[in-house]
Image: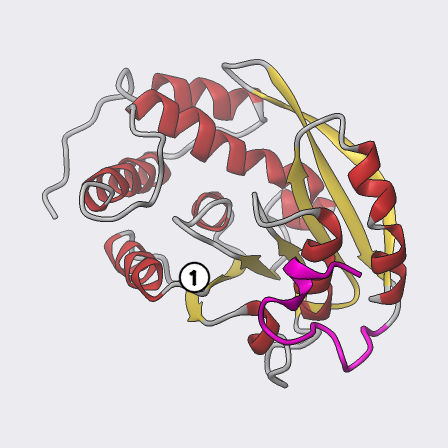
Amino acid sequence: MVNTPHSNETFRALLDGARALGLTLSPEELDRFARFQDVLLDWNQRMNLTAITAPTDVQVKHFLDSLTVLEGLPGPVRNGEQSARLLDVGAGAGFPGIPLAIVRPNLQVVLLEATQKKCRFLEHVVTALNLSNVQVVCGRAEEIAHRPDQRAAYDVVVARALANLATLAELCLPFARLGGEVIAPKKLGIEAEVASAAKAINTLGGKLLPPLIVRLPILDEERQLIRIAKVRQTPATYPRRAGVPAKSPL
């Protein structure tokens, strides 16, 4: 990969947007975001990673949108004062996991992705950005969640654009430790989806917390972080076999 020279002006949207979120990006962090953007747009010419290809749109709709998830993390973790294990389920092209790992090196981030091609991309990004706090696990959540080293192993589980909330809860809650949390960035106005997921969340050992309203800088759009606390162990039968949570939500 050939790094594209960048200036602060090239990344003005990212820098200004991060500042609006309370973050001042260091030169090293900015360089990692620049390299991530280069790799993403390069690989996207050969495989379908994102429909968002204008650099400024990548910075806003991928990088900054991912960083809004920080607001949902426990205070000491959000501020970078405390280590935590974070799992990104259905990581895809690395959002929100990689941006979070860039700005919070204390986070131990695992990217879970089922598609082999995307796993290879993620592994390449981790190497290219020299992210020692990121690991890629390739497999389906329905299967990986039953592995003893993965079940109830994470402080925070995040999932962006993964599934409806009932399905998302079944795929994510088994990974969260007792006292941990699932965070799902969602658009506003999904009250019916949230209500229909209540039974599933309770069955899986979760408790719905009040959502956090976050504002995406630059576009000045509001989103919400749906948060689910893990208050009981998830029954051993969940998640069900591959494909069932999506086809037949609890």
Q: Residue furthest front?
A: 247
Find residue 238 and report its horizontal and vertical position in percent.
74, 74
Q: Viewed as shown, does residue 27 lie left or right of 138? A: left
Find residue 87 and report its horizontal and vertical position in percent.
57, 61
Q: Viewed as shown, does residue 159 lie left or right of 29? A: right
Residue drawn 35% across the image and 63% down it: 119
Residue drawn 74% across the image and 58% down it: 249
Majority secondary structure of magenta residues = loop
Q: How many marks?
A: 1
Residue drawn 83% across the image and 59% down it: 200
Q: Quadrant of the C terminus?
A: bottom right
Q: Residue furthest bottom?
A: 148
What is the quadrant of residue 60 in the picture?
Answer: top left
Q: Residues within 10 Å of mark 1 (few under 14, many from 20)?
A: many
Find residue 76 and report its horizontal and vertical position in percent.
69, 48
Q: Is residue 44 above or below residue 85?
A: above
Q: Viewed as shown, does residue 169 lie left or right of 162? A: right
| Residue 30: in magenta span | no
What is the quadrant of residue 28 in the picture?
Answer: top left
Q: Residue 220: in sight, yes or no? A: yes
The kind of secondary structure element at disc 1 is strand
Residue drawn 76% across the image and 26% down it: 189
Circle 1 is placed at which residue position? 134
The amino acid type, in three-letter code, at marker 1 is Val
Q: Viewed as shown, does residue 15 lie left or right of 185? A: left
Find residue 187 and report its horizontal and vertical position in percent.
66, 30
Magenta residue span: 233-250
| 194 or 28, nearer to the observer | 194
| 222 or 240, nearer to the observer | 240
Q: Is residue 222 above or below residue 249?
A: above
